[in-house]
Image (tube, helix red, strand yellow):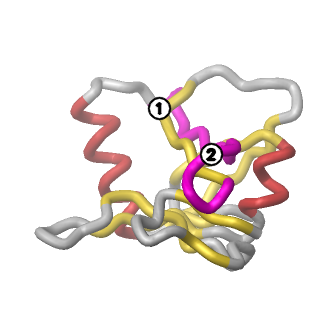
Amino acid sequence: MLYVAESAKEKISELRSAESLGEDYFIRVSVTSGGCSGLTYNMDFDNESKKDDQVFEDNGVKVVTDLRSFLYLCNTTLEFSGGLNGKGFYFNNPNAARTCGCGESFAV
């Protein structure tokens, strides 16, 4: 399961509205090689499903990921932190053994 915190839900709703995206758009999350710790997160709006997509809905937000990425993301919570020292969107990932200083990449 992938989880969505209330803070992330509010920001996603705000962004969807600002970009005039319909309800058919969902959040696509993936993990790719890169970053200083070895793996990095990618997140964007999408409205096209793929064959091996894993689909989750939490807190009223539909989150989709490919099967390979789900192995890294299982039980992860998408969160949002704003303000002067805010991180923006970030992933609270219990599978990450370490993260880089900026929080953009991780290793398992």
Residue at position x 70%, y 66% in the image: 107
- Front disc: 1 or 2: 2
**Residue at the front extreme?**
36
- In depth, the one of 30 and 19 nearer the eye is 30
**Is 91 drawn above or below residue 41 in the view shown?**
below
Q: Quadrant of residue 26?
A: top right
Residue of label 2: 34
Residue at position x 62%, y 62% in the image: 37
**Is 1 drawn above or below residue 66 in the view shown?**
below
- Amino acid beneath label 1: Glu
Residue of label 1: 23
User: Residue 32, position in %: x, y?
Assistant: 68, 42
Secondary structure under badge 1? loop
**Is 34 drawn above or below residue 24 in the view shown?**
below
User: Residue 70, position in %: x, y?
Assistant: 79, 53
Assess disc 2: are there few (<14), some (14-19) or many (≥20) residues with their C-alpha within 10 Å of its C-alpha. few
The residue range painted magenta reads 23-38
Residue at position x 34%, y 47% in the image: 13
Secondary structure under badge 2? loop
- For marks 1 and 2 on the same chain, the one whose residue lies earlier in the sequence: 1
- Looking at the rendering, in which quadrant would you find the N terminus? bottom right
| In magenta stretch: residue 98 | no
Report the side of 37 relative to 101 (left or right). right
Mark 1 and mark 2: span between their CA atoms? 31 Å
